[in-house]
Image (tube, rainbow, N blue to C red):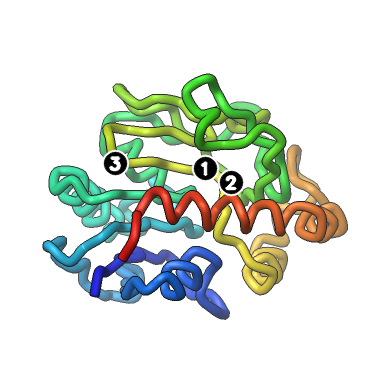
């Protein structure tokens, strides 16, 4: 069975939207958490793709989470093997940093915590629809890696989606978020309420109710195109 490797950085109450969809499509979804002490797997002929997910760790604090260095090297091996690689939030930042991009907090101390519009560039119009509103939980952003193509931008953190080479993409936002994951965010990231850029809990709840169905349709369709058939 074709396998999708999902590198996780925190425990969630249930599989996210992407994992559920890929499993329903017929992929074997293999979850691995280096933060739990689990070893990263080998990438072989049966590897159909890799997802490196978000989490509370920071690329700028590698000494506090040294396994992130292993994940960066792993991402390099995935790319060298020509396997589709999608980084989400921290995952996108790790891939960017691997290729020499700067990762840092917003220069004015803003955060993105809630639902925000992303705007496709000319290169991204075939991938990201205009008017897409996405959940974000970002304290840091990243510069565009050398050689990468910007696919979508945003207001607080300008680099929201990029493509690097033929088979690697990074998203600053979180299309995988389900209601239980948003509930967990609202508990664990409560210290971000009131910071510049952050939405209130009521605004986040309204954003989920208004935008989640369209986000689900877009993200599952993107995964189908990106990883292909099992």
Quadrant placement of the C terminus:
bottom left
> Image point 32% across, 33% down: which residue?
164
Contact, mark 2 vs mark 1 (Cβ under 8 Å): yes
Give the distance between the C-alpha atoms of the residues marked 3 and 1, in whole angstroms.
17 Å
Rate crowding at label 3 as few (under 14), some (14 to 19) or many (20 or more) other CA atoms within 10 Å. Answer: some
Give the side of residue 193 with respect to residue 156, left or right: right
Read off the residue under disc 3: 167
Quick check: 116 left or right of 43? right
Query: Given this view, does label 2 or label 1 mark the residue nearer the observer?
Result: 1
> Secondary structure beneath disc 2?
strand
Q: Residue at x 48, y 59 (%)?
A: 55
- The image shows residue 45 at horizontal and vertical percentages of 12, 62
Q: Nearer the viewer, residue 123 or 38?
A: 123
Q: Establish if 44 lies above or below 20.
A: above
**Labelled disc at residue 172:** 1
How many residues crowd mark 2 within 10 Å: few (<14), some (14–19), many (20+)? Answer: many
Gap between marks 2 and 3 measured at Cα: 24 Å
User: Which of the two labelled residues, at mark 2 and mark 3, occupies the earlier sequence position?
Assistant: 2
Q: Nearer the viewer, mark 2 or mark 3?
A: 3
Question: Residue 107, position in %: x, y?
Answer: 59, 27
Foreground tag (3 vs 1): 3
Q: Quick one: 33 or 118, which is closer to the camera?
A: 118
Q: Residue at position x 57%, y 79% from top?
A: 13
Instruction: Determine whether the residue tagged by mark 3 lies in a helix, strand or loop.
Output: loop
């Amino acid at each position: 069975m074709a396998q999708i490797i999902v590198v996780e950085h925190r425990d969630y109450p249930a599989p996210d939207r992407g994992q559920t969809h890929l499993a329903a499509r017929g992929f074997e979804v293999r979850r691995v958490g280096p933060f739990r002490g689990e070893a990263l797997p080998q990438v072989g002929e049966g590897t159909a793709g890799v997802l490196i997910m978000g989490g509370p760790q920071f690329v700028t604090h590698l000494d506090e989470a040294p396994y992130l260095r292993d994940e960066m090297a792993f991402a390099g091996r995935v790319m060298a093997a020509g396997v589709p690689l999608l980084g989400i939030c921290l995952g996108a930042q790790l891939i960017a940093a691997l290729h020499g991009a700067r990762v840092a907090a917003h220069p004015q101390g803003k955060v993105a915590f809630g639902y925000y519009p992303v705007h496709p560039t000319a290169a991204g119009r075939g991938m990201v629809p205009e008017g897409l509103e996405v959940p974000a939980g970002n304290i840091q952003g990243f510069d565009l890696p050398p050689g990468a193509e910007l696919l979508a931008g945003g207001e607080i953190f300008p680099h929201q989606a990029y493509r690097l080479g033929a088979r690697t993409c990074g998203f600053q936002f979180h299309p995988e978020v389900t209601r239980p994951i948003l509930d967990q965010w609202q508990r664990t990231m409560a210290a971000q309420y009131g910071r510049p850029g952050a939405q209130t809990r009521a605004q986040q709840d309204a954003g989920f109710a208004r935008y989640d169905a369209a986000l689900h349709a877009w993200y599952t369709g993107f995964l189908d195109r990106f990883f292909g058939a099992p």
